[in-house]
Image (cartoon, rainbow, N blue to C red):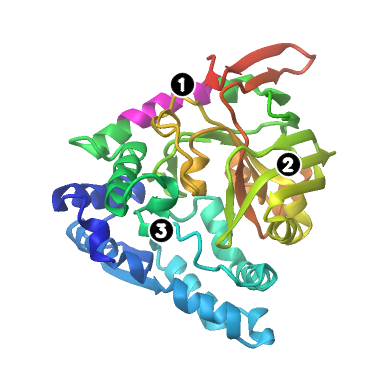
Amino acid sequence: MINEIYEFISEARLKKYAELAVRAGVNLQKNQLLIIHSDIQNATFARLIQTVAYEAGASNVLIDWTDEQSTKEFYLNAADSVIDHYPDWQAARFKEWDDAGAAYIHIISENLDVFKGVSAERISRFQKASRTKLRDHHAKIRSHEVRWCLLAVPYVGWATKVFPNLSKEEALQSLWQFILKGSRADGENPIKDWESHNQSFESRKKILNESQLESLHFTNSRGTDLLVGLPKNHLYIGGGVRDKNGIPFFPNIPTEELFTAPHKNKVNGKLVGTKPLIYGGSVIDEFYLIFKDGRITDYYAAKGQEVLHNLIETDEGSHYLGEIALVSNKSPLAQVDTLFYNTLFDENTASHIGIGNASPSNLQNGNDQSEEELKAAGLNTSLLSVNVTFGTEDMKVVGIKEGGTEVLLMKDGDFQF
């Protein structure tokens, strides 16, 4: 099964995809340590990235293997006390890697049924334990102190879920095509294509950051009517970002979003999800969230209600938002008009929010401010960071300036500036 995943992509094309991850994604520097997080299912691609990284001058490339089937056995059978414990040695690895200046590449491949039959509550508890122990590492990720990149390869079950009317072989081939197209990795020179893609972000970021809008108002025919207040001196991020040393990189491949941090206490109204949310291997679908003064006060999901409950109840901060993102429906991913059942891809087809922690990078000089200063500015803190897609073809977004002047930012799901 593992080998058949790669039957529908040439070795040359797969190497270009790996080079995109190494040379543009994390922008690996000479003599830098690279950590690759990969399930054993994706060993072929992980090893190719390892080879490309050494060619780029890596000092060492470590592959941090995982195995979803073993993880399922752990969730099903481990002692209850173990579920609430994340080992110190695991956290120590990340600290040593971070201290050594490592870059991180995460390879994902959606396996929607892998945790079928597993208690959502046990998954939530272990994830909370791991996030608590790895709080410092995740803080470095969010503040762009370390460089990282997330990208995907197909999986048979994922492909047949996205394309249920195709044969297994046709589904895999189609998913490869969509992943590469959406990731802008299907051209002759993907790295140059990403440099051009990044330029398109710059002018819009400049307009938004100079405007310093007081709030954003989202409406559509699906029932969303959401007013999102913004903190003073907020910053929009999109496309490439820079680490603490000024080295550019692309955290997500693909990426189409312009995002900033909402003011924790200034979100009001209703948000209706438009794409399934995959969380902890489970699916949350046909759901809505109600906000009052920033806090999620009510929620409902026709599918995955318990999972949604555990997500929101992770901690106090998971009742609030840490991100609001604008995404055009004219992006390559949006144009294919396909439900990917994967947050990385679905969130880049339409506007979305992020439940949980806010990035200090979304505030001017935020990375130099204390937790107390960030809190006073209106940024949320949480162990959680989960994106929820709610954009539609008829989404309207109006920016509101101080004093009430309105500026049309999006109409019918597309940018108007």
Mark 3 vs 2, N-terminal side: 3
User: Which residue does the numbered mark 1 point to in the structure image?
Assistant: 203
Q: Is residue 171 above or below residue 204?
A: below
Callout 1: few (<14), some (14-19), or many (20+) C-alpha neighbours within 10 Å?
A: few
Say which amino acid is labelled 2: Tyr
Task: Classify mark 2: helix, strand or loop.
Answer: strand
Find residue 86 and report its image quarter: bottom right
Q: Which residue is drawn at 46% across and 44% down?
A: 340
The picture places residue 215, in percent across and down from the top left corner, at 73, 26
Q: Residue at x 25, y 38 (%)?
A: 186
User: Which residue does the numbered mark 3 point to in the structure image?
Assistant: 157
Mark 2 vs 1, N-terminal side: 1
Give how far apart the Cα atoms at labels 3 and 2 are: 27 Å
Q: In this view, does 14 lie to the left or right of 415?
A: left
Whether residue 150 can be seen here: no
Query: Residue 288 bears which disc, if any?
Result: 2
Give how far apart the Cα atoms at labels 2 and 1 are: 33 Å
Q: Is residue 1 above or below residue 403?
A: below
Mark 1 vs 3, N-terminal side: 3
Q: Is residue 235 left or right of residue 11?
A: right
Q: Does the magenta stretch include residue 333?
A: no
The picture places residue 357, in percent across and down from the top left corner, at 66, 51
Closer to the camera in the image, 127 or 141: 127
Give how far apart the Cα atoms at labels 1 and 3 are: 40 Å
Whether residue 130 can be seen here: yes
Q: What stretch is highlighted in magenta?
A: 196-206
Say which amino acid is labelled 1: Ser
